[in-house]
Image (cartoon, helix red, strand yellow):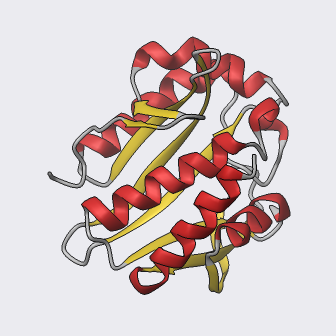
């Protein structure tokens, strides 16, 4: 299986299905739950730009650098967010999990834990990755805490790494899980799911 091939990952609390233009209305509603685009340190687009964001991600998939997903809540069949495998480096078996956001109502639930378990499982078990990376804005403390709770370790901070649309500079915090850590991280995430 090529790294950028579309895949569906199915769990009890979440379904990750290949992102498609048909998800646009569901994603607009999901982003409206919490008005996520108003969080200045995130990159969630406004509802009226959602179709363009879907096409941007699909173009990156066609270029071989991203596998984007719509996140589905199987208890309601609602689209509740997006996530991706991105910055794919198949030669070195390295990938980043990112560009992730969820409707406010499903944040910090079993859905996110299971999404990360399925994505990490696919990266390490199917693709045989040697490392999986996570990146977030220095000011996004909720995201930093969530990544650390997965069992990822902080690698460092890229200072003045990017220029935001408003002209501010982004310091990017980098985390990773390496292949030797995956068995313990997997047990940890499975335990967290069982306790939900």
For the point 78% across and 22% down, the residue is 32
- Quick check: 130 left or right of 48? left
Residue 147, picture quadrant: bottom right
Q: Residue 149 location in percent, x, y?
A: 73, 68
Residue 61, picture quadrant: top left
Return the residue nearer the eye: 175 or 160: 175
Q: Residue furthest left?
A: 1
Is 11 placed above or below 89 here?
above
Is 38 placed above or below 2 here?
above
Q: Residue 1 location in percent, x, y?
A: 14, 51
Q: Residue 28 location in percent, x, y?
A: 65, 19
For the point 64% across and 51% down, the residue is 113
Q: Residue 193 location in percent, x, y?
A: 66, 51
For the point 59% across and 58% down, the residue is 190
For the point 52% across and 55% down, the residue is 117
Count the numbered circles shown. Answer: 0
Return the residue nearer the eye: 82 or 169: 82
């Amino acid at each position: 299986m090529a790294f950028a091939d579309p895949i569906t990952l199915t769990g009890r609390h979440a379904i990750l299905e290949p992102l498609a233009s048909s998800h646009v209305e569901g994603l607009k509603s999901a982003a409206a739950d919490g008005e996520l685009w108003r969080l200045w340190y995130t990159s969630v687009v406004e509802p009226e730009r959602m179709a363009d964001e879907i096409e941007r991600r699909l173009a990156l998939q066609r270029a071989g650098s991203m596998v984007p997903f719509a996140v589905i809540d199987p208890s309601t069949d609602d689209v509740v967010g997006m996530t991706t495998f991105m910055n794919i480096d198949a030669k070195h078996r390295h990938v980043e999990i990112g560009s992730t956001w969820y409707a406010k109502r499903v944040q910090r639930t079993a859905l996110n834990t299971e999404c990360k378990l399925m994505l990490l499982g696919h990266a390490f078990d199917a693709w045989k990755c040697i490392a999986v990376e996570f990146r977030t804005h220095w000011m996004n403390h909720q995201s930093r805490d969530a990544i650390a709770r997965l069992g990822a370790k902080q690698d460092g901070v890229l200072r003045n790494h990017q220029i935001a649309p408003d002209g501010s500079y982004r310091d990017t915090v980098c985390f990773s899980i390496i292949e030797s850590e995956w068995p313990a991280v997997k047990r940890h995430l499975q335990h967290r799911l069982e306790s939900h």
